[in-house]
Image: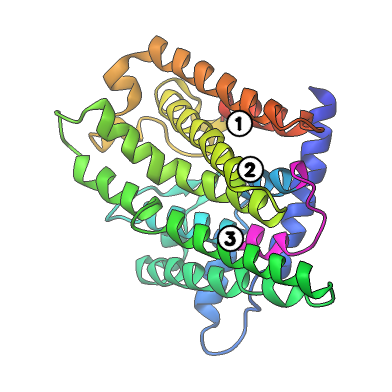
Amino acid sequence: MEDFQKILKTKVFEIEKIIGAYLPKEEGFQRKVLEAMNYSVLAGGKRLRPMLMQETYRLFGGRGKEIEPFMAALEMIHTYSLVHDDLPAMDNDDYRRGRKTTHVVYGEAFAILAGDALLNFAFETALKAFPIQTEEPERLRVEQLLGIAKAMEVLAVKAGIYGMIGGQTADIEAEGSNSITTEQLLFIHENKTAALIQAAMMIGAILAGAGVGEVQRIEKCAYNIGIAFQIQDDILDVIGNQEELGKPIGSDEKNHKQTYVTLNGLEESKEQVQKLSEEAVQIIDSFGGDSMFLKELILSLIHRNK
């Protein structure tokens, strides 16, 4: 575990450099929104999604640089969703990751603009993967360009109305409802949370040249990770420590949200987290190769305390 933490710290540092290299310069008449964008992205965090993308890419033998714009782009999309989640019209949270949220620092209008800007800039960033692969033989270059195009499709779908935004919509509609079912809740979790994790791992596999069946199995693995991650988040909202989490606990109850814990109880929720995480690790094992860090990463994220 000590070795894992050291490796994790090194990888987070490397990912921070990659993300930082793609952030916009804070200049021009639009400087204020650029500052708000960078403030939001540089707020820290686990960098879970770009790390899962990179590790899945390496699992399937990927060694190029075309993954890096996608890593930065996905973190921008994830960050924009958090900026908008924190708005008064949504969760109305004043703190995230231990510091003031974007709307508190820059005002609600600039927080909305910063979120919009990050979503748009994410696709500008991902598109930068295309020029990277230009010196390969023609056959390989065509395959790689097709892979990048497919990765762009996955990014768009998983972030959109059939992914994260769809999940957010269902989540808002369910607020205050006492009749939400486990099926509805899993739809919310699958799309609001798991979709971007699926995007991360699917893009990593696609860019490394994985086959259709392998990408489908990775999508299922990422589904398990995302659902378990969100159930654990629901658990921590009940039993977590605010100082460790860096955000208020009890926000689900405050916003009258039904969660997996309220529907199924704390113990069953813990059992489901364990089952999903074991299945995810089994899928990773089925691909062979050196996946020790990836498996440790998955388990550490799912069974986290913050």
Q: Earlier in the sequence, mark 2 or mark 3?
A: 2
* Residue that badge 2 annotates: 46
Determine the CA span between mark 3 and mark 1: 24 Å
Determine the CA span between mark 2 and mark 1: 9 Å
* Residue that badge 1 annotates: 301
Q: Amino acid at mark 1?
A: Leu
Neighbourhood count class around disc 2 (C-alpha, 10 Å): few under 14, some 14–19, many 20 upward = few
Q: Residue at x 62, y 85 (%)?
A: 27
Q: Secondary structure at mark 2?
A: loop
Q: Earlier in the sequence, mark 3 or mark 1?
A: 3
Q: Is residue 298 magenta?
A: no
Q: Which residues are magenta?
A: 58-73
Q: Which mark lies nearer to you, 2 or 1? A: 1
Neighbourhood count class around disc 3 (C-alpha, 10 Å): few under 14, some 14–19, many 20 upward = many
Q: Amino acid at mark 2?
A: Lys
Q: Is residue 150 above or below residue 187?
A: below
